[in-house]
Amino acid sequence: DQQVKQNSPSLSVQEGRISILNCDYTNSMFDYFLWYKKYPAEGPTFLISISSIKDKNEDGRFTVFLNKSAKHLSLHIVPSQPGDSAVYFCAYTNAGKSTFGDGTTLTVKP
Amino acid sequence: KAGVTQTPRYLIKTRGQQVTLSCSPISGHRSVSWYQQTPGQGLQFLFEYFSETQRNKGNFPGRFSGRQFSNSRSEMNVSTLELGDSALYLCASSLFTGTGELFFGEGSRLTVL
């Protein structure tokens, strides 16, 4: 049973518009949710996180929303830039272990 | 500050062989995790070590093993390689405080022929 699901394998948006990446989870026992970005031939890099006790966290163009009742997480990127084109993974941490979704490939077209 | 270093970056093996991958974490990080990434499968958790002890283990067969040394460097070994073991193996280190943010290496790309 997959505990973290990113139901959209890919997303394409125009430069300057908003990108919304979604993540659903089944396990309510987590400390933090994190988003990572991965470029080809590189390891994932941390993007933004949110604590289980919060419902929103902002960092520049990136905002993460957490809806605990719906067990849903989303990452908003505004405005989207071509350099944002990458694979985005959501993950939660619990007791030292991180569980990842399958990733969503974001393409931002100039 | 040096990042997470993984060696080798690329390797090709044949079925039945075994392979050892190495990971040097960021200085001061005592937690090291290993993940397998295959196309369309996301990052599958293999195991996590902290202070030379395996604390968490994923759902992989016993052919996959690992260890951590006193200097926090870690190795993972895969014995009796199968074609399906072809993947990118990622190592990540963390401080194991706060958010649990992982710092990943660039990975070791294993191809099994």
Image: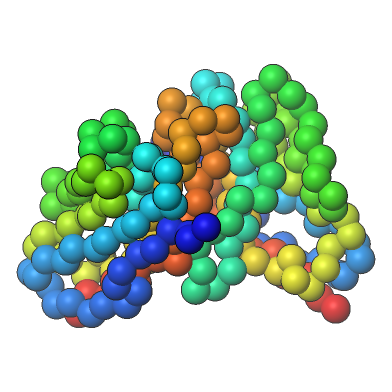
Relative to A31, is A37 above or below?
below
State which quadrant residue B57 falls in: top left
Q: How is the image coloured?
A: rainbow
In the foreground, A92 or B68:
B68
In the foreground, A71 or B8:
B8
Q: Residue at x 42, y 50 (%)?
A: B27
Q: Residue at x 65, y 24 (%)?
A: A52
Q: Can residue B54 be seen here?
A: no
**Residue B80: x %, y % from top left:** 9, 63
Compared across the picture, whether B4 is left or right of A74 comes to left
Compared across the picture, whether A3 is left or right of B19 comes to right
**Residue A48: x %, y % from top left:** 69, 44
Q: Can residue B106 be seen here?
A: yes
**Residue A32: x %, y % from top left:** 60, 30
Q: Residue at x 35, y 74 (%)?
A: B9
Question: How many callouts does the rendering have?
Answer: 0
State which quadrant residue B22 falls in: bottom left
**Residue A83: x %, y % from top left:** 75, 71
Compared across the picture, whether B46 is left or right of A72 comes to left
Q: Quadrant of the C terminus of chain B?
A: bottom left
Relative to B12, is A25 above or below?
above
Relative to B89, is A52 above or below?
above
Relative to A40, is B46 above or below?
above
